[in-house]
Amino acid sequence: MDKLQALALLQGYTGVGIGLMIGLGALGACVGVGIMCSRFLEGAARQPELMPQLQAKVFLLLGLIDASFIIGLGIAMLFAFGNPLIPAGLK
Amino acid sequence: MAASYETPTEYISHHLTFLTQPAHTGGFWSFNVDTIITTILLGVLTFGFMWLVTRKVSTGVPSKVQAFVELSVDFVNEQVKSIYNGTTRLVAPIALTTFVLVLFMNAMDFLPIDIVSMVLGWLGIHTFRFVPTADVNTTFALALAVFGLMIFYNIRIKGFGGWVHELFCAPFGSNPLLWPFNLLFNAVEYVSKPLSHSLRLFGNMYAGELIFLLLGMWAATGIVGTIFGAVLHLGWSIFHILIVVLQAYIFMMLTVVYIAMAHEHH
């Protein structure tokens, strides 16, 4: 039962870690995208003829801003499905 | 279904396992045969197709296929011209190559995982991952190739001595006391570029595939799960179409930006 307890503890903490990774990453990404898009709307309202070029840049910057969040998401998925911190004896 | 799974984790881990072939001692030194085969096949198909189209070019009214290829070449050329104003003529073809290849490698994510795995199971292949860019090795290979090109153009434009001088003296100044700081700054920049370049593409494709798997698993739990799972699956698929094209476009733009930055003098 001691092994089961240790395993449950490890997996519980991993769950909390995954939640923090995804939650904080999403927070940062969404606030960043919100700020960028508000500037885009402001700029498009000021100069509507530049809207197509600005829109192309918006999509490019969207991908760049989302990068760290998606990397964190990938690592969180790795912990969810192939947790490297659980020693082989406990599985 | 050709295979039945005991637990949900087994389903997911089975679909996330590569078809590996150990090269020396296994572990790090092994080939992901499925990724290599899919990449080669896609490269031959897409570039062979474009090459065949260029063999039958007509200067009058173009056929639809020719117009399509011309459209993509023009699009990439516009993007490259807006960023890079130098004299190297290989930058636009590099951009076109990366864009087309990454786009089609990403687009393999549109095929339904279970159906392809069922068909491959009939052929005797039981673990096959057919999205090459969902493999870290592919994206790192592409990013390291771009990194190599960056260093190559740095040395070619500035000369080897000029490049080393810039490594030690930009951006803070050429006082010998500042050399370690300059080197550290430049080292961080040089390390972070290929890392972020590759992991962005990998993370997007890997997370997309994983969410498809998770939604499919959710759809397998009773009738309510199936309905909601199908609806969310549709929504995520439509969003993923945008992500596939967007990530290919971003990869190409960053390639052009990095090569253009290698041409700049400080």
Image (tube, coloured by chain):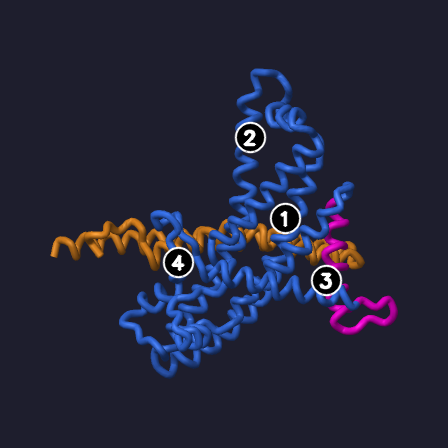
Q: Chain of mark 3?
A: B
Label 2 or label 4, whichever comes before in sequence order: 4
Q: Is residue B37 left or right of residue B266?
A: left
Q: Chain of mark 2?
A: B
Q: So how many labels did they put on this image?
A: 4
Residue B79 falls inside the magenta stretch: yes
Within 10 Å of disc 2 (Cα), the crowding (few <14, some 14-19, many 20+) is: some
User: As shown in the figure, which amino acid type bears the numbered disc 4?
Assistant: Thr
Label 1 or label 4, whichever comes before in sequence order: 4
Label 3 or label 2, whichever comes before in sequence order: 3
Look at the numbered disc 1 and give the secondary structure of its residue: helix
Q: Position of residue B230 (x, y in %)?
A: 46, 78
Query: How far apart are the two marked residues, 4 and 3, measured between alpha carbons?
Result: 35 Å
Q: Are marks 1 and 3 in contact (CB under 8 Å)?
A: no
Look at the numbered disc 4 and give the secondary structure of its residue: strand
Q: Nearer the viewer, residue A87 or A48?
A: A87
Label 2 or label 1, whichever comes before in sequence order: 2
Q: Which residue is mark 1?
A: B254
Q: Say whether mark 2 and mark 3 are on the same chain.
A: yes
In the figure, the shade used to draw chain A is: orange
As drawn, the label of residue B20 is: 4
Q: Position of residue B48 (x, y in %)?
A: 66, 64
Within 10 Å of disc 4 (Cα), the crowding (few <14, some 14-19, many 20+) is: some
Q: Is residue A21 left or right of residue B85?
A: left
In the figure, the shade used to draw chain B is: blue
Q: Which residue is mark 3?
A: B72
